[in-house]
Amino acid sequence: MKKILVLLTVFCLALSLAACAGGSGSSSSSEAASASQPAESQPQESSSAAADGEEVAVMSYEEYMAAELDSQVTIEACVQAKQSWWEDKATVYAQDENGAYFLYNMACSEEDYAKLTEGTRIRVTGYKAEWSGEVEIMDGTFTFVEGDSYIAEPIDATSLLGTEELIDHQNQFAQFKGLTVEAAGQDEAGNDVAFLYNWDGSGSQGDDLYFNVSYNGETYTFTVESYLCDSTTEVYAAVEALQVGQVIDAEGFLYWYEGLNPHITSVTVVG
Amino acid sequence: MKTGLRRLAAGVLAAVCLSLFAGCHGRQEQTAFTVPETFDESRQYEITFWAKNDTNKRQTDIYKQTIEEFQALYPNITVTLRLYTNYGDIYNDVITNITTQTTPNVCITYPDHIATYLTGDNVVAPLDELFADEKYGLGGSEVRFDSPAQEQIVPQFLDECRLDGHYYAIPYMRSTEACYINKTYVEALGYTLPETLTWDFIWEVSRAAAATEGADGVYSLNGQQVLIPFLYKSTDNMMIQMLQQLGAGYSTSTGVIQLFNDTTTDLLYQIADATAAGAFSTFKISGYPANFLNAGQCVFAIDSTAGSTWMGTDAPLLDIPADKVVEFETAVMPVPQFDPEHPQMISQGPSVCIFNKEDPQEVLASWLFAQYLLTDSVQIAYSQTEGYVPVTTKALESPEYQDYLSRAGEDNDTYYQVKLEATRLLLDHLDDTFTTPVFNGSASLRDAAGQLIETVTKSVRRDQTVDDAFIDTLYADTVSLYHLDSISASGGKVDLGAMPAMSVGLLAALAAAWVLILAYLALRHHRKKSAER
C-alpha cells in the first residue's frame, strides 16, 4: 500500500512538472517563430530569398535604386551599425561594395538583434520607402545568410559636400576632413556654443546633438543621433567638448532629412 | 530639425503593450495620500518634474523660468526638470519607474496614460482634497502666489482630468487639430473654400489636385514631381473624429471596444480610394505635413494647433531649406466635418498629474508646484509658444492675453497670424470639442484606431488589395497587436476567461499529489498507533 501511494505521488508530481515544462516550451517557440528566421531554415542560394512563400530575386544595388517606391524589394548586405531595437523592430545601417541601405523598423527578435554584429551578412525583404528624403527599406524581414563579411571603409565625401552627387551615396559610411566648427547657437548669456541638445537647444544631455561645420564657405548641420550613439559614447563626449573654430575630421552615415543630415559616429579634432 | 519625433511610433506601441499589465508586477503598495494639516517649511524638498515640450526652446525656457520663480517663492523646494519631446517616452519611463517606486513627483501626461498608471494602488495622488483644501488648495489662503480658484479652470478641460469619479490631474494647456490649407492652390483648382470644411470637399479637391499629374510625373498644380494633396499627422485623431462626427462606435465610457464596426470599414474604404487616387497620405508614411505644405507639395495639412508655428510661407519655425519654401496664402480651418451644422473636433493637450509618495509633505510640495503652472504668467507665456489655449478663465480673460489675441499678424514671431488663427479656432469652438473615454487600455485603442488607417494607406500604396477579407484580417491583427482582447469592459481588472486545460491539469495533479501525501501520512500514523497498542 505504502509503495503504491508513493508511486502515485511521484507520478502526480511528474505530471505537474511536465505540465509546467510543456507550457513554457510552447510559448518560447511561438515567440521565436514570430521574429526573424534563422539561416538554417532558409535556402542558402544567394540568388533568391523566401518571403511569404514566394521566391523573390535578390536585387543588385542598382536594381534596388531603380525600383519604384512602395514596391517590394529584396537585398543582401552586411550590417554596418545598429541604431535601435524596440518591440521586435530593428533599425540598421547596412552596406555592400556597391551601396548602402537604411533598414527601418525591420522585424527582429531581441536575440537576433544581438547577433546583428558589424559585418554580418543578411538578406532583407521589405518595401522601398522614402521619408522626408531618406530612401529606406521599411517593414522588412530578414534572414542571416552565409557569405563574406563586409565592413565598409569610409568614402571621403568632403569634396562632395554641397554637390548633387552626394545623394548617390545616401546611407553610406563616409568621412569628412578639415571641417571648421561653427556656432550652433547661443547660450543664455549670448555666447556662441558649438553644439545644441536637439535642433534648437530645447533638449538636455542624452538627446540628439546638433552641430554646425563649414567647408568651402558653406555650413552644414551634423547630428549625433542619440539612439545610434548615446551619451556614453566617445563621439557624444567629443561633440560636447567641441569649441567653435576648431578643425575636425568626422565619420558617419549619410542619412537624409529634408537634405543631408549625417549621423556622425566619430569626431577627431585636428586643429 | 525634428527627426527624433519619428521614433515615437514605436515607443508608444511598446508602452501600450507593457501598460496593460503594468499594475500586475510586484510593486509594493503605497499608502493612500491624505493632505497634511500644515506644510512643514522647516524641511527641504527635492521634487522632479518630467515635462514635455514640442521641440521648442521657448517652451523649455519657460519651464526653467517657472521653476526659478517658484523656487524663489518656496526656497525649501527644489525642482529638477527632465525634458521630453513626446508623450510616448514619458509614458514608457513612468511605467518603468512605477515598478521601482521611482516615479517623478510631477509629470506632464495624458488622461489615457493616467488610467494605466491607476492600475497600481495609490500610484497617482487623487487631487479632490487638494483642490478643496482651504489653506493649500486652489486659491488657498496659504498659497504664496495668485492661484486660480477651481471654478476658474475651464470646466470642460477640468472634466477631462476626472477618472473614476476623482480628479487625478489638472489641465495644463489645450489644443485641437486644425486644417492648414494652401488656399492659393484650392482656388487655382477652381474651388472656393466653404464656410465649414467638409470631408466631401477635401476628398474632391484632393482628387482634383492629384489629377493634375502629367505624363512626365510633374503636377501642373505646383510644377513639381511631388504632391500629396491631403496629409494627416495623427491618424488616430482622424479616425476618432470621423467616427464621432458620424455618431459611430469607438468605445463606451466603461471600455467596451466598438471600433471595429461597419462605419469604420466604410471610412477605411474611402481612405483606400483616396490613397489609390494619389490624394492622401500620412505623417508616418511620408513625413511632416508642415514640410510638404511649405514646399508647395500639399494642399490640406492637418496637424495640431500646437504645430501652427511650423505652418505657412512665413512660419517662424522651418524644417526645410529656405529656398524650398513657396509663396502661398494659408487658411486655417477646423478639421473637416460630416455634419457642418454640428461641428465636432477633438480636445487635446497636456495635463499634469502628481505621483503619490510615502511622505505626504513631499506630495504637498509637488502639488504647490503643479498649482503654480496654472498661474497667469505661466499659462499666458506657454500658450504663446504655439497654438495653445490657457486652461483658466482667469488667464483667458486677462487684459494681457486679450491684447495678445488682438495683435494677430503684427509680426511673424509672437503674433504670427497662422498661430493666432489656430488659437482662435479652438477658442471659438470650445463647445464643439470632445474627448474619448478614458480607461485602462484606452491608449491602446487610440493607437489601434490610427493603425487601421496607416495599414490601409500603406497597403494601397503597395498595390495590395483592400477588400472585405483584408479588412477582416486587419481587424483581427489589430486586436491582437494592441491586446484589445485583454481590455475589460470595466476598464479595470481583466477577465481572462476559462483556465487553459494545461493549467487545469497542473492544478489537478498538484491536488492529487497533496491528497496522496496526506493519505500516506494518515496511513503511517494509523500503523504507528496500531503498533503502539
Image: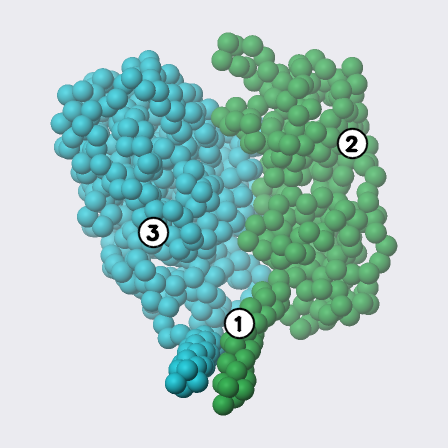
Q: Which chain is cyan?
A: B
Q: Is residue B389 visible?
A: no
Q: Which amino acid lies under the numbered mark 1 shown in the image of this protein?
A: Cys
At label 2, which amino acid type do we have?
Gln
Quadrant housing residue B105: top left
**Rendering coords of residue A89 (x, y %):** 59, 53
The residue that mark 1 highlights is A20
Residue, x 74% and y 49% (percent of image)? A117
Q: Which residue is drawn at the image coordinates 62% and 54% (left, top)?
A: A110
Pointer 3: residues within 10 angstroms few (<14), some, or many (20+)? Answer: many
Question: Which of A132 and A233 lies nearest the eye of the viewer?
Answer: A233
For this view, does B21 lie left or right of residue A193? left
Residues at marks 2 and 3 on the same chain: no
Residue B119's tag is: 3
| Residue at (49% x, 35% y) in the render | B294
Q: Is residue B23 left or right of residue A226?
A: left
Do tags 1 and 2 sit on the same chain?
yes
Q: Nearer the viewer, residue A265 or B364?
A: B364
Residue B144 x, y percent position in the rendering: 22, 17
The amino acid beneath tag 3 is Thr
Alpha carbon of mark 1 to alpha carbon of mark 2: how far? Answer: 55 Å
Q: Is residue B453 left or right of residue B461?
A: left
Element carrying mark 3: loop
Q: Decide if residue B110 is in sight here.
A: yes
Query: Looking at the picture, do discs 3 and 1 lie on one chain?
Result: no
Numbered tag placed on residue A175 in the rendering: 2
Chain assignment, label 2? A
